[in-house]
Image (cartoon, rainbow, N blue to C red):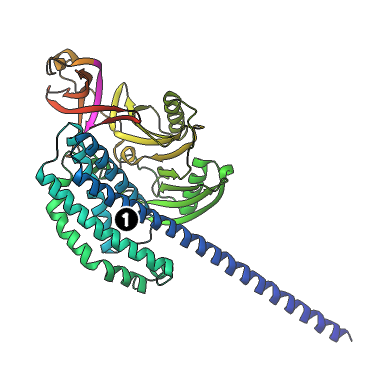
Amino acid sequence: MKDIINKKNLVVIVVTITIIVILLAYSLYQKEKTFETSTQNNYNMAFYEVVNHMQDVQNYLAKSLISKSPENGAETLSNVWREANLTEVYLSMLPLESQELENTQKFINQVGDYSYSLSRKNIKREELTEEDLNNLEELHGYSVELTNTLNQLSEDLNSGRISWKDLTSNKTSPFAQEVSNITKDSFNNLQESFREYSGLIYDGAYSEHLANGEKRAVIGTEITEEEAERKAKELLGENKIKSITGLGLSENSNIPGYNFAIKDNEEHSINVAITQIGGHIISMNSDRNVEAEAITQEEANEIGKKFLEKNGFLNMKETYFLKQEGIVTINYAYNQDGVVMYPDLIKVKVALDDGEILGIETTGYLNSHQERDISKIKITKEMAKTKLNKDLQIMSEGLAVIPTEWQTEILCYEFKGKIKETEFLVYINAENGKEEDILIITNTPNGTLTM
């Protein structure tokens, strides 16, 4: 009798354990499916943004071909530069590492830089030359090809014919082959064109200097994705986060880092990137819309500065800003003993309804920041003034370090002044008195631009 009871107990235990194992396996399976779905959704969101911003690049390039006004041309080309940068940001969030897609990223970067360099000509009231317009027309043609390719891939993804899982699980997958087949001819043509444009595209633009710096401020030990996630939570405030999904390590980025897709308590999407070395903030961007403005520009400047101080970016000075749709993007440069360090640039987005920080981008700072030797001043400020146009009415003066297109830096006297109704920034080398650069300041209702 006792043996029968023991056998029954044993059966009950075995059945119970079996049920528990099955339930645990099912639970793990469900969690894996949920994570997979979330990851796919994040990739789809990023790809949607790539397609959307690339379409805007194409449209603005088309407008630049028919614009005869330097003012309108400058605005249009600045929009190309902005949309190209956004395209590149979202493209870096995708698990695509083929040669064709590396060329895509390079092409987008060059479109942005070339547009920026031409916008500088327009802001100086110079019309674009026939050569400039021919180059833009070619870039527009390539952008149409790229947009069509991306739209085709979008349709294939939406129809389920190909999936992100195909690519992330196997580099020789049908999806990877699909990418290669669809894009091969277009990107081969683009690659040939890069050789023609390489010298032209980077003329006079500072963005290449900022993007390919020495990463002087990326210091510390290598961290894990879990440690990077903690950094992202600290940045936003863990109590404000509803969900956070790791998108992996972007090893091929200019600054390798971990990317995260976040939903806050109000269901806004936020993207955060943290460096693999040291756990520094690379970028953060929220998609929250701002419907009204309740704070001033001065208040926004202070909010941005306090946010930077809280996150370890000290002695930052606001320089210029751009306001769009209730959000102001403020440029902050490092200030060392009263000298403005323009290469050490950080951009902060502040919502003008309640002062919430909606974005930060630190690439310039991370690439360039260090303490400089500012003792090599061989001419006085008064001597530097003798190099200025006699008609320039000086409004302010000081010292600044500026980047060059050769990825070097120059210590200069910075003079802000006006001739008639036009404002200028003039940079005189503090060692030899050479006129290094002249920028035109354009004050618009939405902000202050320098070209």
Furthest toward the top, the residue is 382
* Residue 253 seen in the current view: no
Q: Can you say which quadrant of the picture contains the N terminus?
A: bottom right
In this figure, which residue is indicated by the disc labeled 1? 252
Residue 358, image x, y percentages: 45, 39
Q: Which residues are magenta?
A: 395-403
Q: In the image shown, does 289 or 315 lie closer to the viewer?
A: 289
Q: Element at badge 1?
A: loop
* Residue 398 seen in the current view: yes
Furthest toward the left, the residue is 130
Location of residue 238 (image quadrant) = top right
Q: As shown in the figure, which amino acid type bears the numbered disc 1?
A: Asn
Residue under the point 23% across and 49% down: 62
**Counting other residues with Cα less than 10 Å from the Cα at mark 1, is it few (<14), some (14-19), or many (20 or more)?**
few
Residue under the point 38% across and 71% down: 170
In this picture, is 68 found above or below 187?
Answer: above
Q: Can you say which quadrant of the picture contains the C terminus?
A: top left
Residue under the point 36% across and 74% down: 174
Residue 306, image x, y percentages: 46, 29
